[in-house]
Amino acid sequence: MADFLSTGIIDAQTLQKLNLVPSPERIRMGPVAIIECPQEIPCDACVAACPSHAISKTNINSLPRIDFNKCTGCSLCLLACPGLAIFVVDLSPTNGKAYVTVPYEFLPVPKRGDKVALLDRAGSEIGVGEVVKVVMSRDRTYAITLEVDYDKAMSVRAFKISSRR
């Protein structure tokens, strides 16, 4: 946890320790939200946004917990999160690809079919993906679904639009 507090980058081991990641079996069943929010802060937007009541908190400052068996991967929590700390991962496709939905609040907004540079939690480029879906919330936060190589799905947390559009 100390590394996260000094670097601002959460690692997979910290997520596992905090029980914020679903089992590999659950992720392969279909889309599921992953909340990468490791600090106890006064926020519960994700709890209020979840229509299946899969997200809970013991109090306003506690870490959000997901009942991964209730989560449908609808992305409403992702759109509601002011910290942009929620992602939806779907490892169910069988074509060597996966889907990762990330929050996005920049311009220009990518379009379906755009090829983008995939970024990991540290902002390093780790490959190329394709935009397959763009959804806008009322407050203009976007949920961008990317098709990525299967082995990169748990690492992709952002993307960069090519300068050539």
Image (cartoon, rainbow, N blue to C red):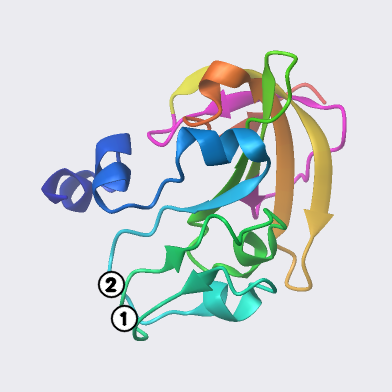
- Looking at the image, the residue that sits furthest to the bottom is 59
Q: Secondary structure at mark 1?
A: loop
Quick one: label 1, few (<14), some, or many (20+) residues within 10 Å? Answer: few
For the residues labelled 2 and 1, the Cα–Cα distance comes to: 5 Å
Q: Residue at x 16, y 50 (%)?
A: 1
Quick one: label 2, few (<14), some, or many (20+) residues within 10 Å? Answer: few
| Residue 117 shown in magenta | yes
Q: Closer to the camera, 68 or 123?
A: 68
Q: Closer to the camera, 33 or 106?
A: 33
Q: Closer to the camera, 88 or 95?
A: 95
Position of residue 75 relative to residue 80, above or below, is above
Q: Quadrant of residue 147?
A: top right
Work out whether residue 52 can be spotted.
yes
Residue 100 x/y as whole percent: 64, 37
Q: Residue at x 77, y 66 (%)?
A: 137
Position of residue 128 relative to residue 53, above or below, is above
* Magenta-colored span: 102-123
| Residue 28 shown in magenta | no
Q: Secondary structure at mark 2?
A: loop
Q: Closer to the camera, 113 or 161?
A: 113
**Residue highlighted by disc 2:** 40
Work out whether residue 10 can be spotted.
no
Q: Are marks 2 and 1 in contact (CB under 8 Å)?
A: yes
Position of residue 83 relative to residue 153, above or below, is below
Magenta span: chief secondary structure: loop
Residue 19 x/y as whole percent: 32, 52
> Could you say which disc has been placed on residue 61 in the image?
1
Residue 33 x/y as whole percent: 57, 52
